[in-house]
Amino acid sequence: MHKPGTRPRSQPAEAAEPFASGAIVMVTLNSPREKYWGAVLAISPAGLALRGFDLNSFEDVVRQVKSGDEVAAHSVFFPMHRVERIEMDARDGEIPSMQERYLSKTGHSSARLLLPDGGR
């Protein structure tokens, strides 16, 4: 048995806190409707701090990275009343995650782009 508020030793930390700082996620916003892909910087009752890109610019970012241009992710804050949905960026059957798409198109890990320390 484990103490309330703690996790059993067999449960990985990412399962206990899937949206912890550094998690790569897809965020759906409302008013106006937007979608973002990025790394969670912080999440609180006030909102979500994210380092990433509007999903509409994904192909442009890929093109810039492939051509050797310097690309920097945006650090943004979304008030919680705008956050409609947060989901882990994960493969769905045959549909690759955004991280997998980025890697296959650029040859680079998305951690280098999305995490403040470059994934180190």
Image (cartoon, grey):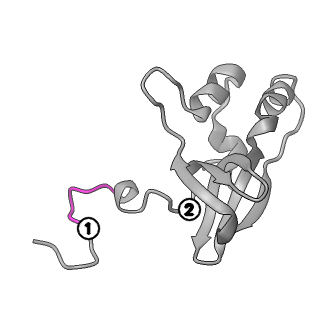
Instruction: Find disc 2 in the rendering and name its residue.
Output: 21
Q: Residue furthest left?
A: 1
Q: Which residues are magenta?
A: 7-12
User: Where residue 55 appears, x then y in whole percent?
Assistant: 74, 40
Q: Is residue 23 visible?
A: no
The disc placed on residue 98 is: none
In the rendered structure, does residue 10 fall within the stretch colored magenta? yes
User: Main structural element of the magenta stretch: helix, strand or loop?
Assistant: loop
Residue at 15% in and 73% down: 2
Question: Is 51 located above or below residue 26 in the figure?
Answer: below
User: Where residue 25 appears, x then y in whole percent?
Assistant: 58, 48
Viewer-closest of 82 and 73:
82
- Asked where in the image residue 107 lies, by quadrant, the reply is top right
Tell me the distance, in whole angstroms, between the alpha carbons under discs 2 and 1. 18 Å
Instruction: Find disc 1 in the rendering and name its residue.
Output: 7
Residue at 57% in and 28% down: 100
Type of the residue with mark 1: Arg
Q: Residues within 10 Å of mark 2 (few under 14, many from 20)?
A: some
Q: Along the horizontal axis of the image, is 23 left or right of 6?
A: right
- Asked where in the image residue 42 lies, by quadrant, the reply is bottom right
Q: Residues within 10 Å of mark 1 (few under 14, many from 20)?
A: some
Q: Residue furthest front?
A: 31
In the rendered structure, does residue 107 fall within the stretch colored magenta? no
- Asked where in the image residue 44 lies, by quadrant, the reply is bottom right
Type of the residue with mark 2: Ser
